[in-house]
Image: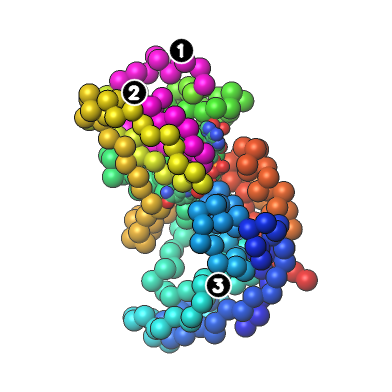
Amino acid sequence: MKIKAVGAYSAKQPLEPMDITRREPGPNDVKIEIAYCGVCHSDLHQVRSEWAGTVYPCVPGHEIVGRVVAVGDQVEKYAPDEPGHTLGGYSQQIVVHERYVLRIRHPQEQLAAVAPLLCAGITTYSPLRHWQAGPGKKVGVVGIGGLGHMGIKLAHAMGAHVVAFTTSEAKREAAKALGADEVVNSRNADEMAAHLKSFDFILNTVAAPHNLDDFTTLLKRDGTMTLVGAPATPHKSPEVFNLIMKRRAIAGSMIGGIPETQEMLDFCAEHGIVADIEMIRADQINEAYERMLRGDVKYRFVIDNRTLTD
Ligand code: NAP
């Protein structure tokens, strides 16, 4: 079936409207009418081939929420997938194996603000759980963007003492409103020094290369900083002695599996957690990318997919 989408034909071109083809639902497939799709910084990395290897045409979008409109008659086994690469959620519909469909328990009116939970939410929830953020733990969240603002809300809901690190002075009060107990301007050496050797865990969501030593020195003995931000070019190599001296660790984490994503959605529904979003029309996507690069979004753009029309 032919549907409307927005995507890019090359790394150097802006996104533009395009018609794409979805496979007819197979026996194990679920066809979803997409209502909203979040705009992740990873979409921008992918569209501009900043991680290399993007296949064009490219339709990004993985924070997809919508309504099931058709299902296959068998729902237990994989059917062979169609050849080619997967086109994402900046489109009217998607057909996926039922294994990758999640149940949303939030009220219907929160649906748009649930979309970013499917990447920004799980990418922060999973490491916070793995490194046991909770009561009695001091947890830092670096970068208050799409991922970071969810990290603050989730770590707060888990009961940790949350310190937000930002390069944007203007976000100081907003970070407190999100649930941060303290906010540090990471460009202010005195503010940083006040937290030396004190963190159990730091979640670093920054989308650009920066000096990791500024944060590893804030970890206490056996503390871990986990990188989820995935910049296009590497960070400067961290100072090894900062790790050796207190058995500190630098780790990484990638989104999360399907069972944990369902667990995260249920946790968020139970705690009344959604993303803070700014809704856009599909034809505003290129402007949204430029604003995201400037840090000018509070805190996630979400496409209203009903605006994908002729
Ligand atoms: P975003 O909304 O653009 O937020 C990134 C934040 O990082 C900015 O708001 C800013 O926060 C801070 N920042 C940006 N440039 C900086 C710089 N030069 N120095 C210091 N801080 C800077 O991006 P996002 O959607 O949250 O994604 C963040 C990163 O995570 C991206 O690289 C994305 O690809 C990656 N990601 C990874 C996974 C995974 O599985 N690991 C999943 C999704 C996304 P302040 O203004 O507060 O400083």
- Image location (x, y in percent) of residue 156: 40, 34
The residue located at (38%, 58%) in the rendering is: 262
The residue located at (55%, 67%) in the rendering is: 55
Q: Nearer the viewer, residue 188 or 300?
A: 188
Query: Alpha carbon of mark 2 to alpha carbon of mark 3: how far?
Result: 45 Å
Residue 94's disc number:
3
Q: What's drawn in magenta, residue-wise?
A: 187-215
Query: Alpha carbon of mark 1 to alpha carbon of mark 3: how far?
Result: 50 Å
Which amino acid does the dot numbered 3 rest on?
Answer: Ile
Q: Quadrant of residue 92?
A: bottom right
- Give the labeled residue for mark 1: 190
Q: Is residue 261 above or below residue 173?
A: below
Residue lying at the far front in this picture: please name it.
Answer: 237
SS at mark 1 in the image:
helix
Residue 217's disc number:
2
Q: Is residue 200 above or below residue 64?
A: above
Q: Quadrant of residue 249?
A: top left
Question: Is residue 279 left or right of 38 when viewed as pictured?
Answer: right
On the question of residue 19 being in view, the answer is yes
Q: How is the image coloured?
A: rainbow
Q: Nearer the viewer, residue 155 or 248?
A: 248
- Specify which label sits upstream in the sequence, 1 or 2: 1
- Image location (x, y in percent) of residue 171: 58, 28
On the question of residue 223 being in view, the answer is no
